[in-house]
Amino acid sequence: MSEIVTTSYNRPRFYRLLFIVVVLTLHVLFAMLPDLLTVFGVGKLGIWFRDSYAMLAASDAAQAGYNPFVENPYDLSGERHIYSDWWYFLGKLGFDRTSYLKLGFGIVLAFWLAVMAVIPFRTRQDFWCALALGLSPPVWLAVNRANPDLLVFAIMTLIVPMLLSERRVVRILATMPLALATGLKFFPILGGIVLLCPAISRRENLAKIAVTLVLLVFLAWSLQAGVKNNLGVSWLAMGQFTFGAAAVPLKLGMDDVLGVTMGRVLGLGLVAYAFLRPSHTAQVESKADRRDQLFSLMGVAVLAGNFFLTVGFLYKGLFALWVLPDCLRRIRDKTAFAPHAKLAVGCLIGLVWLMPIACVTSYEWLKWLAPTAEAPFRRGVSIAADLLAWGAMVPLVLIFGASLRACWMRGEKWVS
């Protein structure tokens, strides 16, 4: 009887169902007890799905004849639109500001469906690590806001199964979801690295390159106003739940431009070192492994790209869910990069939970901490989290470089 129970307990279907139950339970708790968010350091922002409302406000402003890049009178805070004008099509699809809950629920649902498609839930380790990352407070923040990053994650998740499709036309058109995601929020273009992985024939590679170039020209033409406007927004995320290579220098008083520039230079240097450094990477043995590695390449490109380019909010960590299956597989198979993967996963989990736990326990440590020491203590916790981010990014980039080197130098094929 015990053997039967153990076998049932290890079924991926069981873990998948249990994950769904936990997600639904957590959402119900937040709806009934929204102060739980505040306890873990996540602001409630006045209304649910604040970012969805902002996108719809920009669309409404555009329909009313305003230029949301300059003024957005329909936004709750009067903030101007900082993404592309593709969001204005929401109005043409029949959405307006009164639809923000409907749009927000749709974005959140699309995200969780994508997470279910990415995580294989083959083992207990898959389940617990997916819970630790996917249901962490930074992701709660993105869900609370119905942030566009959730939609970007869902759209880009389509790329990998399309690249692994048995139909050539589907593989070639894998560029389409990447173009859509890029048109919504710019940075997804970094994930296009997976499109450079060689296909099964030179003819298919050429076709994929041709489609990609056409879409790049279209994106460059279509997004020029949005990109120019975005570059004119001079802000960096500060305080808690920040994520970026320049975060520590900025918190230590370094100039913004110098700190961000240093982060970018270090990032480029690390990627170059990881790619050029001779290293061994395990041979891909199954379609499932190729799937995990493609998700990982896309995930590291987006995650590390956001980390080294600027300082944003920690909900960017949700893109680590693409990286998780490949890291856990390397740990289980004890490959050459198993120690790197173990360090990366450990630091990622520590990163997304350190500051929330500090918020939960603040009532206790504030009782014995001198008032003058509170601010330095909070800053120390924040810097410790930033160092954990470095502890995750460095090994992930080393794995990323080795995978690219194996793919391009040895010509590994990613499609059966």
Image (cartoon, rainbow, N blue to C red):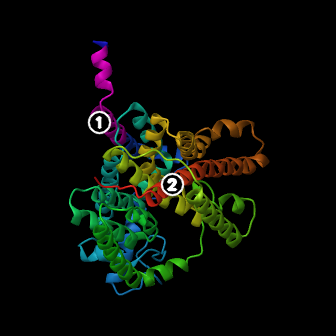
Name the residue nearer the viewer: 32 or 251.
251
Q: Let me know if residue 306 is in the magenta part.
A: no
Identified at 28% across, 76% down, the residue is 91
Q: Quadrant of residue 358?
A: top right
Which stretch did the figure color magenta?
Answer: 3-25
Query: Mark 1: which secondary structure?
Result: helix
Mark 1 residue crowding within 10 angstroms, few (<14) / some (14–19) / many (20+):
few
Name the residue carrying label 2. Answer: 400
Relative image position of residue 199 (x, y in whole percent): 33, 62
Query: Mark 2: which secondary structure?
Result: helix
Which residue, as the protein is rendered here, is positioned at the far top?
1
Q: Looking at the rendering, in which quadrant would you find the N terminus? A: top left
Residue 91 seen by the camera: yes
Q: Let me know if residue 21 is in the magenta part.
A: yes
Image: 385 above or below 183: above
Overall secondary structure of the magenta stretch? helix
Q: Amino acid at mark 1?
A: Leu
Please tell me the numbered disc located at residue 130: none
Please tell me the numbered disc located at residue 17: 1
Identified at 47% across, 79% down, the residue is 227
Q: Is residue 173 left or right of residue 272?
A: left
Image: 21 above or below 348: above
